[in-house]
């Protein structure tokens, strides 16, 4: 397979526009398509704004050169027909993903690869009817993809086995950190890990053990500091004198007993969500959410710049 040079982005919302930056900043030519005319009209301005912010912290040099590699297509066919790689980022619904996969299938080159940004729906749920289904898989990013580099590659049972190692190399070349999920599971790895933490957070709040703010602080000023440069296995390997085996011996029984407390998973009830939402809206009014997202992206950019400077 030849290196990816021409990329199509299908769906240019939060995630699709970030993906356009990922590919263009590494030299690829990017064609962007969205079903909404208003999104097509505004996406290049949004991308330029993000690039300007990235330049301020040294994450990119030449905003004009990167933005100049990105163009907007008025039709799906125009975006995908010449693409080596197509990144689909439309709504997270099986019916929408199925329809767009069939439409891409009809317009793509037979040797192109199609990665879906799906957060948790496996590719086998929406690509079965595609003629080129062996070219489809999930390439799940984290929002925003141009700042948080991990991407989960999740093949369907019918994905050509040569595609995962190829895309792993290519995603790394584009500055992402690819991880491979060997076989399909709902939520993949990232959202299963996030879900385990969220489910416990909701339960602790519901049972009155702590406020939402204190649960958030435990992650922001505790667990999360380490998690920005190491995962749970490396964390425990360093947290006992004899490494992971020593940690397991000392604290394994505690974690086993904690897991036994939660044998009946509960839905996030309306009443419970309402209570956390009320605490959050008191701390951050709804009209300030967009500003706080911009603050988050600024902090993320500085963290990414710091990690890149450390090179480890
Ligand atoms: P979004 O709502 O910001 O963007 C979706 C875009 O797709 C919209 O602009 C919409 O007009 C367009 N669209 C819908 N149907 C289309 C079609 N048939 N053809 C062309 N364009 C179409 O949503 P977002 O957040 O960007 O999510 C996109 C995908 O990425 C979803 O699968 C989502 O689960 C996934 N994802 C989202 C993350 C997040 O935190 N927002 C993180 C990682 C993945």
Image (cartoon, helix red, strand yellow):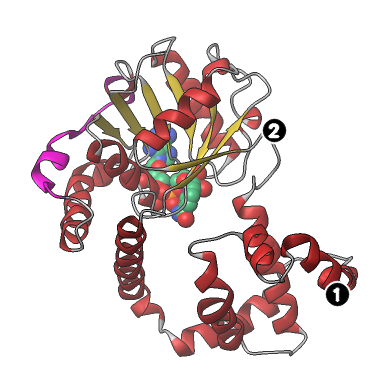
Ligand 1 is within 8 Å of the C-beta of the residue at disc 1:
no
Q: Quadrant of residue 171?
A: top left
Q: Residue at x 55, y 17 (%)?
A: 162
Whether residue 174 is visible, yes or no, is yes
Q: Earlier in the sequence, mark 2 or mark 1?
A: 2
On whether residue 115 falls in the magenta region, the answer is no
Q: Are the residues flagged by discs 2 and 1 in contact, CB closer than 8 Å?
A: no
- From the top left corner, tell me how far across and down residue 43 is, in percent: 23, 46
Image-quarter location of ligand 1: top left
Label drawn at residue 183: 2
Residue 203 percent coordinates (x, y): 75, 77
Instruction: From this view, report whether residue 150 is shown above or below residue 310.
Output: above
Name the side, left or right, on which 32 lies relative to 165: left
Foreground pick, 151 / 234: 234
Camera-nearest residue between 104 and 141: 141
Residue occupying image coordinates x 43% and y 40%: 89
Residue hosting label 1: 254
Residue 254, above or below 304: below
Q: Secondary structure at mark 1?
A: helix
Which quadrant of the rendered structure holds the N terminus?
top left
On the question of residue 255 being in view, the answer is no
The 10 Å Cα crowd at callout 2, few under 14, some 14 to 19, many 20 or more, is: few
Is residue 310 shown left or right of residue 159? left
Camera-nearest residue between 302 and 45: 302
Asked if the beta carbon under badge 2 is closer than 8 A to the nearest atom of ligand 1, the reply is no
How far apart, in angstroms, are the residues tagged by discs 2 and 1? 30 Å
Determine the image quadrant of residue 173.
Answer: top left
From which residue to which does the magenta span run?
Answer: 61-78
100 relative to 271, above or below: above
């Amino acid at each position: 397979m030849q290196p990816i040079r021409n990329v199509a982005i299908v769906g240019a919302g939060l995630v699709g526009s970030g993906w356009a930056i990922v590919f263009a900043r590494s030299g690829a030519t990017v064609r962007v398509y969205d079903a909404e005319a208003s999104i097509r009209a505004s996406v290049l301005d949004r991308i330029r704004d993000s690039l300007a912010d990235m330049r301020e912290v040294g994450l990119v040099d030449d905003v004009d050169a990167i933005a100049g590699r990105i163009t907007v297509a008025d039709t799906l066919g125009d975006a995908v027909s010449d693409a080596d790689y197509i990144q689909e980022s439309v709504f997270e619904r099986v019916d929408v993903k199925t329809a767009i996969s069939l439409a891409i299938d009809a317009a793509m080159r037979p040797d192109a690869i199609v990665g879906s940004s799906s957060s948790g729906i496996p590719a086998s749920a929406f690509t079965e009817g595609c003629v080129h289904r062996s070219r489809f898989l999930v390439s799940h990013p984290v929002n925003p993809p141009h700042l948080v580099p991990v991407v989960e590659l999740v093949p369907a049972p019918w994905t050509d086995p040569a595609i995962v190692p190829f895309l792993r190399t290519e995603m790394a070349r584009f500055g992402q950190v690819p991880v491979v999920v060997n076989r399909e599971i709902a939520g993949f790895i990232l959202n299963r890990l996030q879900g385990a933490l969220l489910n416990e957070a909701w339960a602790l709040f519901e049972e009155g053990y702590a406020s939402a703010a204190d649960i958030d602080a435990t992650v922001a000023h505790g667990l999360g500091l380490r998690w920005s440069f190491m995962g749970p296995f490396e964390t425990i390997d360093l947290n006992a004198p004899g490494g992971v085996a020593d940690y397991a011996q000392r604290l394994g029984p505690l974690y086993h007993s904690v897991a036994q407390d939660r044998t009946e998973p509960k839905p996030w009830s309306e009443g419970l969500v309402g209570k956390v939402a009320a605490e959050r809206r008191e701390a951050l009014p709804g009209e300030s959410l967009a500003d706080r997202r911009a603050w988050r992206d600024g902090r993320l950019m500085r963290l990414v710049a710091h990690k890149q400077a450390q090179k480890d």
